[in-house]
Amino acid sequence: MGGTREWRVEISQKWDVLGPFPIHAREQHFLSPAFPLDLSKNIDLTRTYPSAYADGGYVSWSEASSDEDGNLKVSHPNIRWEQLRATEGWAALQHHNVLRTYLTVYPPDSKQERTEADPRLRVECLQGAYFSILPGDETTWTTHVSEWHMGNVYALERAPVQFVSFPTSPCRAKATRYQVVLCGSYEIRLFGDPRSYNSEHPILSINFTISIDTPPSLGTSSYLATPVLHAPAHDVIPDFIYGRPFSSTLGIGLRNVDFCRNTKSISGWWTVVSAAIPPCAGLGLSLCNLLTGIRLAPTQTHTLTLEFQPDSGSIPTDITELPVDITISPFHDESACSDVDEQRIFRVNVPIRHIPMWTSVSFTAIRATYNLGFSNPTIFLVLPPRYPKKEGEVGLKEPILALHGAGVDIVNQTFWADSLPRQDKAWVIIPSGRTSWGLDWHGPSAADAFAAVTALHDILRKGFVDWVYPRDTELIVMGHSNGGQGAWYVASRWPDKVKAVVAAAGYIKSQAYVPWTMSRFAHFVDPALRAVLETSLLPDDNDLFLSNLAHTPVLAIHGGADDNVPPWHTREAVSVLKEWNPDADVTYYEEPGQPHWWFEVLKNTRVQAFLDRVSCSSYDAPKTKCRKFTLTVAVPAESGPMGGWRVHALEVPGRLGRLEVCEDDKGGVNVKASNISVISIDLSKASVSEFVINNQSIAHASAKAGTIWLEQGNSTGWKDFQQPYGRAQAILSADRIIDIVIPSLHHSSELSVALRITHNLRTYHLLDARILSAHEAENGLACGGNMVVIGCADSLLVKDLLRRSQSEWSHEGGAWVLNDKKFDNPTSEHQILQTLRLFLQSSDLGGLERALRLFPIRTGVLVPDWLVVDERADRIGAGGTEGAGSNNGKWGFNARMSWLN
């Protein structure tokens, strides 16, 4: 091997493969990614392991090879897959593999190039679940705790660079060998039915590449002249019309490429001090000042949120780049450096796209932007209507909210916008859902969709008044595939916001899409525990909420030959809806012979006729003498009103709540409330003169009160209630930057976990996070939004947060305690959600790794309000749970919906 002037890494193209093992679609978040291996011991390639998939019940190691671009295909043609799927269907095709290979790091031959700080790896893992870099010497594994990094499972198009530290320092004098262990899970939603790609067996496709990133020596400054770089993939840029930005929000992607050195001082942290368009550019555009400095941790990718000044001028259409000068300052020992000499200024040239003003015959899908809480800037597309409103009209018709399918990048893939029907008098709004997969249009993805509707109204009100629609407009929700599922979800959770639904090729819920028949944990878990864990899936079960659409016009569509989402999903949804209301305005059309997607699925005369009918100003749902409906709710914070009635809190969170309302033509209302403790009635939408709830007559103020609040007391029945309370939104449903609190900003395991969470938040949801020390949080530097606390169990911060939330959790004598139950297993991890704070706790490094894997980054992971698991979970999944449960309506212990070992 010849010498080299730089650090270099080579990865073997030969992979050892162990599998397949039965698993359900999200079980890898509970199990060790290396299951069934014990990585405290040597890997024995001659050993066999039990697997229900193999003839004889055991599988052995095999081999696979990647190409020079890192593409790796893994399959097991010796398994009788057809026999398995004959009885278990798609569930039998999902499986887990462990893969192992080697990488070798070569030092530079020149001592001058050998830096004091270790180099690090840049890893791209597409469609692999988890990976870890281990020492090459397996004799050291007995004391080594594997650090697991989440792969880019969905191959999301704007994932940030993933930096990974070496488990041990590479030798400066000779080559050093390491091992790579990779968790590869075959999921039907990712890879599809093998028959769709003409294979008799499932083929796992992963791309895994590694390069090396070299730090400067501590004494040099040439590299540090630009420790923060422009990350163009994370820009959020509106289109320009008439030389002006269509919307005011601008996002600039930044990546901190500095190093966190393992020293006694804080290093590698930088703060963005300011951003401005230089006056010398002469563009007539200016940016608002930053309200506060934005701090970037080492390796962190972040989108800087900026706003154009409202009085900014226009720029010539031949200007295609916008220069922005960004000033950064190093951050030392928990204080930003104000020394001008240490500040750096670098220029970012932001590309801009000019498009012509739309007409009745020509248009371009417009890129628009918005931000919430001056963080997390987001892009969405809009299709303008052909005609503006006429004189005397209040506004245009209800906009159409068009939800894309899984994996569809609305910015770079034009087919989705091209396949939607442009309207005469209605905007078509195409939200991103934050990413091409998002959270399946639940939680933050649904919030993003609604925020786009409000954002467009504000944009039009300021610059295009003839094209504006009312701010409180109803919506027509449309979607295909995952977006079709999202249309069912959004419409059934916010029925008063939705005037009609067009749902194409949507699945009814994830457990019905691919059953959990082959899950490993099912063989070990107590039935009562399983019921508690599955309450975390309840908010996503669309079929349970179809009562909320019993009086909403629905057009359901499916291709008769769909091999991606079988047509029975839509048929069953329509059947359930008809059960709630036999006279429901629901139409089901099954296109014979059509697959999952065809271009005209939503762009045809049938869909347009439905849209014309429901958007007609004189159209309204048929009224009957007795207006009767049922509102079903699982998470009040993620559900809206129906007919003016809204549920704000459940009596027993974790269970369904139902409100049955029957109104006569004289304004009398009879209500039956099941598992509901707080409701409100908007008297502008619900004409109520007197009503009875659970056989109790309720006296209330006059209609001038606007809204009535009622709370069910333990013994006093229902009574007026002035202030709402309810279950907080999921930790991902943040309307501002998420704070992640760790003991200190020095190099530590907690910092490693925090950096991996920030990476996962940006990869899967394009959400930004800020890492704080406990000391900073104690002194009020947190933003006041959602917070993740890693460790810090004995800190004043944790004690204060638990006290203020009146939590029944406490940390005493080194152990967490709930309702006199002490969790003192040192290997246990704790996830505890209290109000808007998520505590990730463990006194053991392995436990902290489990806590990270169970961070609720994807749908379908069995994590209720609080969860404690120990090292048994590495082998038996959720069967290794010590306790789990949902909180009560006031964040206290909920005995009826909890399980303790």
Image (tube, rainbow, N blue to C red):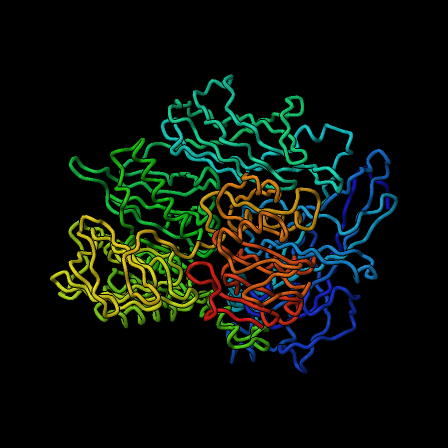
Above-or-below relation of 161 to 331: below
Q: Quadrant of residue 24?
A: bottom right
| Residue that protrudes farthest toward the front in the picture | 716
Q: Would residue 266 be found to the left or right of residue 178 on screen?
A: left
Query: Residue 246: x and y, percent?
Result: 38, 33
* Quadrant of res 544: bottom left
Relative to 728, residue 589 above or below: below
Q: Is residue 376 visible?
A: yes
Residue 465, position as x, y percentages in the image: 26, 33
**Total labels drawn:** 0
Tell me what residue is drawn at x 68 percent, y 28 percent.
225
In the picture, measured across the screen, residue 77 lies left or right of residue 664, that is right
Q: Residue furthest right?
A: 173
Q: Could you say which is closer to the camera, residue 97 or residue 80?
A: 97
Residue lying furthest bottom: 56
Q: Is residue 216 above or below residue 145?
A: above
The quadrant in which the C terminus is found is bottom right
Could you say which is closer to the camera, residue 301 or residue 619?
301
Image height of 839 relative to 281, above or below: below
The image position of residue 394, as x and y in percent, is: 20, 40
Q: Residue at x 20, y 51 (%)?
A: 684
Residue 601 seen: no
Q: Nearer the viewer, residue 339 or 86?
A: 339
Nearer to the camera, 227 or 873: 873
Q: Residue 112, how many percent across, how many down?
A: 84, 33
Q: Is residue 515 left or right of residue 598?
A: right
| Residue at image location 79% in from the left, 41% down from the top | 7
